[in-house]
Structures are given as C-alpha cells and as structure tokens.
Image: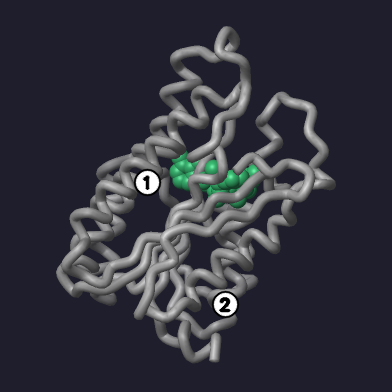
Amino acid sequence: MAVEILANKKVLIVGATGGIGSEATRLIKNGQANVFITGRNEKKLKEIAHANEIPDSQAFILDVTDARAVEALAAKIHEKIGQLDILINAAGIGYLNPLEKTDAEDFMELIDVNLKGAFLLMRHFLPPMKEAKKGLVINIPGVLGKAPMAGAAAYAASKYGLNGMVKSIREELKRTEVRITNLYLGGVDSSFWDRIDMRVNRDKFINAKEAGRAVWFLCQQPASGVVSEMVIQPFNHQAI
Ligand SMILES: NC(=O)c1ccc[n+]([C@@H]2O[C@H](COP(=O)([O-])OP(=O)(O)OC[C@H]3O[C@@H](n4cnc5c(N)ncnc54)[C@H](OP(=O)(O)O)[C@@H]3O)[C@@H](O)[C@H]2O)c1
C-alpha cells in the first residue's frame, strides 16, 4: 500500500544530507519514488546519492539562501519532469543562546537559512503545483515554531516566521488541493546539535531515523485530506 502511494512520485528532498533528510531520503527512495536531493556538503551528498541509487544528475549542491540558485534549480527540475508531487524542506540550522549573547549576525543567519530559505523554496516550487492544483509541501518548523524557550529568541523567530508564512500561503491555495504539512519536532539527535552550545541529553532525544520516518509517513497520506500539522516530542520534554 505504502509503496503504491509513493511509486513514481516526483519528490525533492532539500537538506538530504542531514540527519532527518537522509533517513527520509532512504525510505522515500525505497518506496520507488523518483527522488531528487540537495545538500551543501558535496561529499555527503554523493554518499547519500550512491547509497540510495539516486543518479548524480538528480543530486544537487544547493545553498537555500541563494535566491538565484534556488530559482535555477527549480527551472531545471521543472523542465525535466514538470511540477513536483512532493517538496520536503529538511534544511535548517540551529542556534540557542541567551539574548545578550546573540549577535545580529547570528540572528540574520537563522532568518536567512530557516526562513528566507523556506520562502525561496516555496516561492519557486509551489507555483507549478498551484497551477496543477495538487502537491504536498512538508516543512519542519519544530516545536520552537510555536512554543517559546529560553535561549531560543533568534531560532524561534525564524521558525515562528516559517509557521506564519505557511499559514498565509495556505490561504492562497484554497482553490487547489495543494497541501502543506508542518512537522513540529522536539529535540532530534542529529548534527543539528553539534553547533549548539548548551548542555542537553541527546540520549533522550527523538532518534533521527524516527524523525525521518515521520516525514516518510506524511508522504503516504491520501490526498483527500490534509495533515496540516504533526507534533512529535521527546517524553521528557513536552513543550506543547
Ligand atoms: N534536530 C532537531 O532537534 C530539530 C528539531 C526540530 C526541528 N528541526 C528542523 O529539522 C530540519 C532538519 O534538521 P536536522 O536535525 O536533520 O539537522 P542536520 O542533521 O544538521 O541537517 C541539516 C540539513 O540542512 C542543510 N543545510 C544547512 N544550511 C543550509 C543552507 N544554507 N542551504 C542548504 N542546506 C542547508 C544541511 O546541509 P549540509 O549538511 O550538506 O551542509 C543538512 O542537510 C531543520 O530545519 C531543523 O531546524 C530539527
């Protein structure tokens, strides 16, 4: 059943080199989808492509903050296969620090990657879906996209922004069957935390494989309804 739903679906996974994105890539490719992937790290991207038998011609280096690069990739993919069936945005960066330690540069980097990046992806991949009146977009705002936490001012700004942006875009999709799902994850044990200077117990986090499986699960949902959001949190830290 699951295999049938994904078979031949045209799926782009942005941030396929990450903990969540790489697992989602593996499962979705196993479902016989026509998978396109992106990452910034060329070595990791090649490894993921080869491990999943994704041709090099469907694996792209992409910095989501680069408006021209996102536009060019969208044009290339649309020319090759038409509109996507599923766009998964699993790219993003983390940062947690008290306000007095957060510089304007840190703030802007989060806004650039987590918010502008998501905007650019939807700006360039959604219009053909809208025209075809069908498709699915999955973003991962995380629980800090709708719950506050000390030290998360900059990160939450980027993710609450994503949440508000998605809700507004949904209003523009009302006469279509284009669905947007927000996945609100609590802490996931991935390299996301390597650059965060905060003592956390990663053993108690959600496993990255399970988070990737949640993305895959969302791709299976029938088009007659919309899963507008899904929330998964570690047992010991339920913020919402
Ligand atoms: N881990 C968590 O606790 C958690 C919780 C809630 C929500 N999330 C969200 O889930 C998403 C995936 O996180 P993860 O845990 O899988 O993190 P991860 O393992 O660190 O992966 C992050 C991914 O984003 C890509 N990336 C970073 N900056 C980019 C840029 N400027 N342009 C293009 N790609 C970029 C990375 O590419 P390269 O590796 O190739 O550089 C990598 O593929 C993020 O949006 C994150 O905010 C994570």
Nearer to us in this view, 151 or 118: 151
- In the image, residue 137 above or below residue 156: below
Q: In which quarter of the image is the C terminus?
A: top right
Find residue 19 and report its horizontal and vertical position in percent: 65, 54
Q: Which residue, given by chain and number where applicable, does mark 2 sit on?
A: 53
Residue 79 appears in the picture as rendered:
no
Rounded to the nearest whole Å, what is the CA distance between mark 2 and mark 1? Answer: 27 Å
Nearer to us in this view, 173 or 122: 173
Q: Which residue, given by chain and number where applicable, does mark 1 sit on?
A: 118
Residue count near mark 1 (Cα–Cα under 10 Å), binned few <14, some 14–19, many ≥20: many
Q: In which quarter of the image is the N terminus?
A: bottom right
Instruction: Tell me which residue sits at (61%, 71%) in the image.
Output: 26
Residue count near mark 2 (Cα–Cα under 10 Å), binned few <14, some 14–19, many ≥20: few
Q: Which of marks 2 and 1 is nearer the N terminus?
A: 2
27 sits left or right of 228 in the view: right
Report if the CB atoms under discs 2 and 1 are less than 8 Å apart.
no
How are the colours assigned in the image?
A: one colour
Q: What element carries label 1?
A: helix
- In the image, residue 128 above or below residue 167: below
Find residue 225 and report its horizontal and vertical position in percent: 37, 74
| Farthest-out residue, top | 100
Nearer to us in this view, 90 or 148: 148
Find residue 30 and report its horizontal and vertical position in percent: 59, 81
